[in-house]
Image: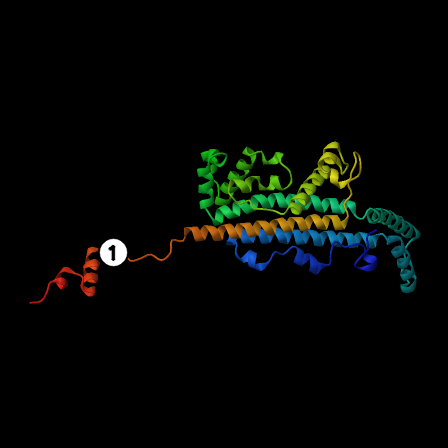
Amino acid sequence: MAASTLGPCGPRLSPPHLIEVATTPPNELMSRLPPITRATVRDFLTYLREEIALNELSVQGVDRLSGAVALHKWTLEADEILNTKRSPEKIAEDEKDAHRVAKVAQAAVDSDFATLNAHMLVACWGALESFSEDVVVAMLRDKPDLLTQAVEKGPPVSTIKIPLAEYVQMSQDDMLRRIVRDAAQASKASLQSGRSRLEAVLEMFDLAGPTEASTSTKLFEMHQIRNVIIHRRSIADDRFVRHCAHLGYKRCDKVALTPKTVFEYVQAIVNYVTSLIQHLSESLENADQSNYEGPKEAPTTKATTARTRRKRGTGHASTRPKE
């Protein structure tokens, strides 16, 4: 079992303060985002922190339950001290339950909490896919010109059709979300993997930005592992082995995740979101600068031109020689 940061409590992904730092992009970057987009990013990062915290609580609880048999014995000793009466049948039933719970908990500990880690990875990837849609919708609400520009670029956005009966009942958020989803379907984003899958719609609205190669690799691995967990019960198939040969799995191997591995994937998500935030803020700043025309000069009229000439001594009345 992996070394624990809490002694007998079992392994942790990371101390709480490190989790907070790891899932918090610099405030400077966040402050440069428009309000709806900024709130969307914060909500997503809050979800990641909650997911990590819940996973850690589960790890600690299961680790303690592996000692259920010893706890049952201590309870019997406490009963004698406190003169608490329990029937032999009740004691036998409690002991049986203690052995059952301890067996399940110890199996989880021995696997380095592989099932918990798998659930966390699936949840985090699903949240990331949702975020990739949410952030586009948020940007379209903050900057409506982005939708106009996407329509001017042509298909698939320009060819999206919404029945009038549905359109008149839609809120702004529902309409934009329908546009984003229909655009994703038209671009066949669901057939792509990893970062490419996430950015298929971002690219339609010129919102996709550069990502470090190591982060892209982690996201690709994460998506492939998610598919194996969901569709193959964590058993490696030929497709997974072929696409992730560098991970060293063979066909029919159990794809087991450690707390350390899951945390690395979560950190890759945060790195991706941070790079996306930076790209969005820089793009917005560049757009604002390109739209800035500088200070405007006061309009010139014939009357103001004549007054200026008289003041400078260049008007017709002032240029005639005095007699």
Quick check: 166 left or right of 108? left
Residue at image location 21% in from the left, 59% down from the top: 304
Report the residue marked by disc 1: 300
Assign a secondary structure to mark 1. loop
Comparing 18 with 162, the one in front is 18
Residue at image location 19% in from the left, 61% down from the top: 309
Residue at image location 51% in from the left, 39% down from the top: 179
Q: How many marks?
A: 1
Image coords of residue 49 (percent x, y): 67, 54
Comparing 78 with 261, the one in front is 261
Quick check: 91 left or right of 276? right
Image coords of residue 42 (percent x, y): 59, 54
Image coords of residue 185 (percent x, y): 56, 34
Please name the amino acid that badge 1 sits on.
Thr
* Figure colour scheme: rainbow
Image coords of residue 151 (percent x, y): 45, 38
Residue at image location 46% in from the left, 37% down from the top: 153
Which quadrant does the C terminus fall into? bottom left
Spot the residue most to the left.
323
Label 1 CA crowd tier, 10 Å (few <14, some 14–19, many 20+):
few
- Residue 85, compared with residue 191, is above or below; it is below
Which of the 4 image quadrants contains residue 311? bottom left
